[in-house]
Image (cartoon, rainbow, N blue to C red):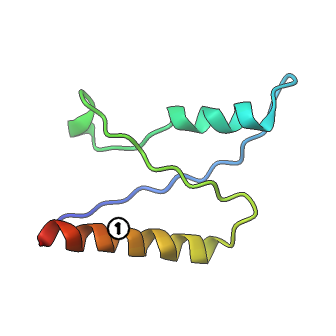
């Protein structure tokens, strides 16, 4: 099994009177994927980490991905 992950941390700062919601929407335009998938890029998963305890959030995401892999193997 080949499993690769990319994590991108952003600190969004609204400019020119934009709201935080508008700034947060910008993150959906940022994606990381292998160059071999450039013609058909996969959708990214976005975690809102505002006011979150980072280690727990990452641990939960890893557990979620492990469960998805177990389901694929069935």
**5 vs 57: above or below:** above
Residue 62: x %, y % from top left: 42, 72
Q: Quadrant of residue 68?
A: bottom left
Measured along the vertical axis of the image, is residue 5 above or below residue 64?
A: above
* Residue 6 image-quadrant placement: bottom left
| Residue 18 place in picture, x, y as percent | 81, 26
Q: Would residue 26 appear left or right of 42 to someone viewing this image?
A: right
Placement of the C terminus among the 4 image quadrants: bottom left
72 with respect to 49 (left or right): left
Q: Position of residue 31 (x, y in %)?
A: 44, 40
19 or 16: nearer the eye?
19
Q: Residue at x 30, y 34 (%)?
A: 41
> Where 11 sits versus 68, above or below?
above
The residue most toward the left is 74
Quadrant of residue 73 within the rendered picture: bottom left
Can residue 43 be seen in this snapshot? yes
Would residue 40 be found to the left or right of residue 12 on screen?
left
Residue displayed at 73% across by 36% down:
21
* Quarter of the image that includes the N terminus: bottom left
Whether residue 1 is visible, yes or no, is no
Residue at x 60%, y 53% (from the top left corner): 9
Q: In the current view of this chain or complex, which residue is farthest to the top? A: 16
Q: What residue sits right under mark 1 in the picture?
A: 65
Describe the element under mark 1 as helix, strand or loop. Answer: helix
From the viewer's perspective, is residue 23 above or below residue 56? above
| 37 and 60: which is toward the camera | 60
Observer-nearest of 68 and 32: 68
**Which residue is more in the foreground, 58 or 72?**
72
Give the residue displayed 71% in from the left and 48% down from the top: 11
């Amino acid at each position: 099994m080949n499993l690769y992950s990319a994590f991108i941390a952003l600190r969004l700062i609204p400019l020119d009177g934009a709201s935080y919601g508008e700034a947060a929407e910008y993150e959906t335009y940022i994606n990381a994927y292998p160059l071999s998938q450039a013609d058909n890029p996969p959708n990214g998963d976005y975690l809102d980490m505002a006011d979150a305890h980072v280690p727990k959030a990452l641990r939960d995401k890893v557990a979620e991905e492990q469960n998805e892999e177990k389901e694929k193997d069935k």
